[in-house]
Amino acid sequence: MTQELTPTRTAQRGWWRDAVIYQVYVRSFADSNGDGIGDLRGIRDRLPHVAALGADAVWLTPFYASPQADGGYDVADYRVVDPLFGSLDDAAELISTAHELGLRVIVDVVPNHTSDQHAWFRAALAEDAAPAEGTERDGGAARERYHFRPGRGADGELPPNDWESVFGGPAWTRTRDGAWYLHLFAPQQPDLNWRNPEVHEEFDSILRFWLGLGVDGFRIDVAHGMVKAEGLPDIGSREQAKMIGSQVLPFFDQDGVHDIHRGWRRLLDSYAGERIGVAEAWAPSPERLALYVRPDELHQAFNFQFLNCPWDATAMHAVIDASLAATASVGAPTTWVLSNHDVVRHLTRYGAGDDALGLRRARAAALLMLALPGSAYLYQGEELGLPEVTVLPDDVRQDPSFFRSNGQDGLRDGCRVPMPWSGGEPPYGFGPAGSWLPQPDTWKSLTVEAQTGDPLSTLELYRSALALRRELPGLGDGEMEWQESAEGLLTFTRPGFACTLNTTDHEAELATPGRLLIASAAPVFSDGTVALSADSCAWWAI
Ligand code: GLC
Ligand code: CA
């Protein structure tokens, strides 16, 4: 099952099985009107960059009406574009421009929770805030859409159970009338009750709204969280943040979520053009993750085990094997990813304090990922070799997890610093004036402009790799085979192709595998052998 060479690859069936999808963090990509915040027009004007890079699709983070308590993952109205980002017309124009450029468009949908400013939640609060004389404060239809519960303790002063918010602190907040509501994230993000049919109907309608506008799919936020265990049982541990992704919790990875995804698959399939669903699911094992991509469920699920894997050949080999085996068992491709808007950029993770080392490894990791069978997600700026910005002053930070201790590390702003496009000083062409998070002075050499045409740049490495990936019939979807290699090295072949990775800190010599196609750092050839640079990856035609 190899990918055929065709110029109209995006028109193929199963386009998503090996698609390269570029994540645009809307607020940080390009600002069209000078308020320092990225917006839809800014994105539309910069789409040629993504097309020239060689991606097949873009994924846009939420741009819906929102008080922005969590970067737009707190949606107040799912059918309205937040004025901060533009209008519905701008969204429609962006979609049609993308399509003209041969790019598909995936948008985020946030079904686990709404904003506390959503009409439903406002109604839920209003309903009991001032109950009519003689009526009971037991909630009502509006509260049935969320998880409202009485508290524990003599006066209901304790939260209904011991669940902790992913952002730190209790997962419950008490309303003025004494009831508590559940929020697995910030208090401004009340969790929806997916046992209520109204919630299903509403989200079907929201999906149809955006499908009607021409989107090609959805990235499903917290796709593992919508269903909570019956009775909302205690967990009995204060270490819940550490348990996420390593075990099934009463609020994460419950089997019931799969019914929702099956329903959405049916809905997606009722539209022409292979619209897809990609799960953001934190599952404890590749096998549990593969359940989300069974043939009647979603198309893709981010492989966070790969993202979390340390720079270690043995560990990478194991993760790759486990991921491929698990997805193959359900007939799905694997979905590789190294970075996104929630994690420290991989350059910085791999560099552990040394950005030069991190860059060598990040370049190598990109070639590794793009040579593996399946689909890959790129996070804006990784094609420029952007590091995490680790020096943001506290007063510019916006990530809600920064303000709530004990949960996520609270450092998600450092990967959200706006893109540098051109010029010698901030905002580096991001927009006419300023940027919502300050960009480092050192980014002058990292702009798209500065790197374009420089064959040694990371941008040109990505462009060449993506072009090769399109040209070579052996890449994309299909099989791979490991070859014997020395410790710290990985070698695998695919039809007509070999990939070598050296994760060690020294040169590694081996018999030349074939004709060099591309390398993250130039190898040195001598008679019949080649020395692979430390922390490098190369592609070979065989
Ligand atoms: C997802 C998003 C993250 C957000 C959270 C709550 O993990 O990627 O940015 O904070 O969901 O919606
Ligand atoms: Ca703007």
Image (cartoon, grey):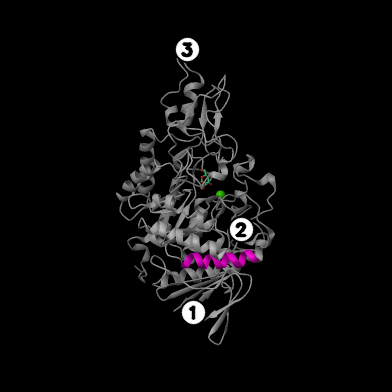
Disc 2 from disc 3: Cα separation? 59 Å
Viewed as shown, does residue 128 lie left or right of 444? left
Q: Position of residue 134 (x, y in %)?
A: 46, 12
Give, as a single range, the part of the protein colored magenta.
357-371
Q: Is residue 298 left or right of residue 244?
A: left
Say if 206 sits above or below 95 in the image. above
* Label 3 neighbour load within 10 Å: few <14, some 14-19, many 20+: few
Residue to which mark 3 is pinned: 133
Residue 513's disc number: 1
Q: What element does badge 2 sit on?
A: helix
Question: Which of the two residues, 387 or 236, is positioned nearer the viewer here?
Answer: 236
Q: Quadrant of the N terminus?
A: bottom left
Tell me the kind of residue under disc 2. Answer: Arg
Q: Which residue is mark 2?
A: 349
Q: Bin the neighbour count of mark 1 within 10 Å (Cα to Cα): few under 14, some 14-19, many 20 and up.
A: some
SS assignment for the magenta stretch, majority: helix
Q: Real-space Cα distance between discs 1 and 3?
A: 82 Å
| Along the line of sight, the residue nearer the viewer: 439 or 377 | 377
Answer with left or right where residue 531 lies relative to residue 197.
Answer: right
Q: Is residue 266 visible to the viewer in this orientation of the structure?
A: yes
* Three-letter code, disc 3: Glu
Q: Can the viewer see residue 417?
A: no
**Count of numbered tags:** 3
Disc assigned to residue 408: none
For the residues labelled 2 and 3, say whether their Cβ atoms are less than 8 Å apart: no
For the residue pair 454 and 227, the one nearer the viewer reads as 227
Image coords of residue 145 (percent x, y):
42, 31
Mark 2 or 3: in front is 2
